[in-house]
Image (tube, rainbow, N blue to C red):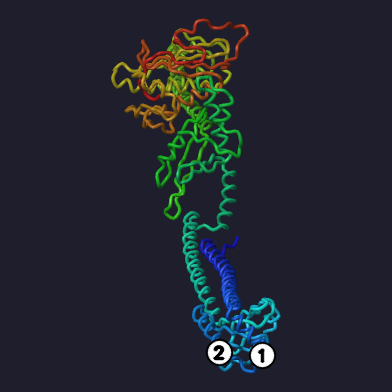
Amino acid sequence: MPRPHRSFSRRVLISQLALVIVILALVTGVFAWMGARTVTEVTETKALATARTLAIDPDVRAAATQASAEHADEPDEQLVTSMLAITDDLRDRSGITFAVITDDRGIRLTHPDRSKIGHRVSTSPDEALAGRENVSHESGTLGETVRAKVPIYSNQDGETVVGEVSVGIFASVLDADVRRELILLGTVAVLALALGGVVSVMLGRRLRRETLGVGPEELAEMARDQGAVLHGLDDGVLGFDANEKLTLSNSNAKELLHAASAGDIDRADGKADADDGAASAGESDDELVNVPEEITALMADAPADGALRRRITIGDRILLATAVRVRRDGVSVGGVVTLRDETQMLTMARQLESVTAMARALRTQRHEFANRLHTVLGLVDTGANDEAHTYLSSILGTGPITAPVEDIDLISDPYLRAVLEAKGTTAAEAGVALAVTPDSLAVGAVRDPEAVTLILGNLIDNAVRAAVAGRRYAEDGGRVEVQVLSSGAELHAVVTDTGDGIDDEVAEKIFDEGFSTSTAASAPDFGIGLTTGTGTGDGHGLGIGLALSRRVAEKGGGAVWLIEGHDPDLGGASFGMRLPDALDDLADVGDVGDLGDVGDVGEDGDVGDGDSTASGLR
């Protein structure tokens, strides 16, 4: 769309000034006409009032009656003198131009020009002599005047017209009054125009400042682009104004935050009703979402330049939030927060870590197998058959190759064995012993290996990290024990370590996404992220693993919780896991009775009393 040559604010200014000028011209014209009309009416009224006053004067009536009765060729000098005295005095006092008195024939008895006395008036006296008052603009012997003509009635019967009184005011006097009115009105119009121009300029500047110099065409184009971009993004988008108030959000943001808000309400003490949840989450797609405090704080902490990224927990989702402040021409116009659901990605990343650890363990086992097969081959080639037989017997007696997990034979499910063997290999490389407790018993096949390996793998990784960190104060190495039990289709597990334990003040925070109390360990990274931690919840799991494990467990109706902050036997933290419907419930197998040392944990997975201080990375 082609853009106008002039800026929008200038076009608005020109339009406003044109409108002000047109309005002022109309108003000035109307008031000028009304002013001129008013001045004319005032002048005519003055002339008529003066003529009436003179016509009812007793002396004037008597003189006009006498002159009309005599009809002399030359008016009586004494009568004329007395009338001149009256008219001259009246002219001097009232400011009129002339006052002429005639008899019933229209013969002048008075006139400013004495030579005109005794002659007929120059303008028609018929209206007044007929008994009718008359006001007109006429040109006579003295020039253009406004004239008022009033009949004079006889002083004898009061009904007979015996003459007229003609009072005139120069038209120049009227024009001067009109000019004064127009000058005053014009002055007011000019001042109003100047004031309108100043206000228009100020309004134009204000408009340019508010719209950042963007015209309506650009605003319309930006609105169309904004709609297309907002609805075309896979991420959630929240827009804030300069006061950090939410002004827009796209459908993805509403979906993420509405669903998250509903999840929060459902978990709040188990008492929130559905109506409150609907009100909190918003009921219409046209409504703006309720912004969680985490996003408000993120927007408040966003720098003036660059972006601020944080992982935040909203309901059962882990969102990567990015806050960016928006500036135009050096003026802050608000900010934008984008939301990306990373729950699935982090889940897959954890699963990939488990698979990678298993693959590493398998590569190690393959290497060991190759070495032993080479040894056997060498013995056979040299004819040492007895020694080869003895060597193979010793290998069969040692159990699984490179699987330093004590009592691993108690676990029959291949998925559980695989994750334990993989974690045992990496733990052994870190100098930590991984053991299955002798009272472990899991009957049935794992139905959901992804969830089981993710949660159990996270708990073991955290325990190994804690044991490595705790080994700084113990020379005999670390130890991690895993207890696995089944009850029908339910799978229970307890993971305990010899780390430093978890203190009470942080026991409630360890499951918060992004929370971590650990710093990087000095030991090498053995594939479990020992040296990736910064205590700030980076992408390798610090501050993510426990939160993610709990969400995955709760999604399936299970739980992950802290049983003991300081285990009485091993000294470190003890975590519990319960996953319903995780195993195929075999019909010929009864429920397992006692779950062993699972701790004081109810069916809802609530944490019992325990001490807590971060043992490694929780």
* Nearer to me, 397 or 68: 68
Q: Give the class, few, some or many, for how many residues have Cα within 10 Å of label 1's Cα (few <14, many ≥20).
A: few
Quadrant that contains the C terminus? top left
Mark 1 and mark 2 lie on one chain; the one further toward the N terminus is 1
Q: Give the class, few, some or many, for how many residues have Cα within 10 Å of label 2's Cα (few <14, many ≥20).
A: few
Please tell me the numbered disc located at residue 78: 2
- In the rendered view, tell whether residue 381 sits above or below residue 187: above
Q: Is residue 308 visible?
A: yes
How far is mark 1 from mark 2, CA to CA? 15 Å
Identify the residue at image location x=57%, y=75%: 46
* Nearer to me, 6 or 420: 6
* Nearer to me, 357 or 368: 357
Q: Circle 1 — which element?
A: loop
Quadrant that contains the N terminus? bottom right
Q: Position of residue 176 (x, y in %)?
A: 52, 79
Q: What amino acid type should be assigned to the residue bearing mark 2?
A: Gln
* Nearer to me, 579 or 380: 579
Left or right position of 319 against 33: left
Left or right position of 610 against 411: left
Q: Position of residue 340 (x, y in %)?
A: 52, 37
Q: Which residue is mark 1?
A: 71
- In the rendered view, tell whether residue 214 sits above or below residue 78: above
Identify the residue at image location x=48%, y=15%: 493
- In the rendered view, tell whether residue 609 sits above or below residue 69: above
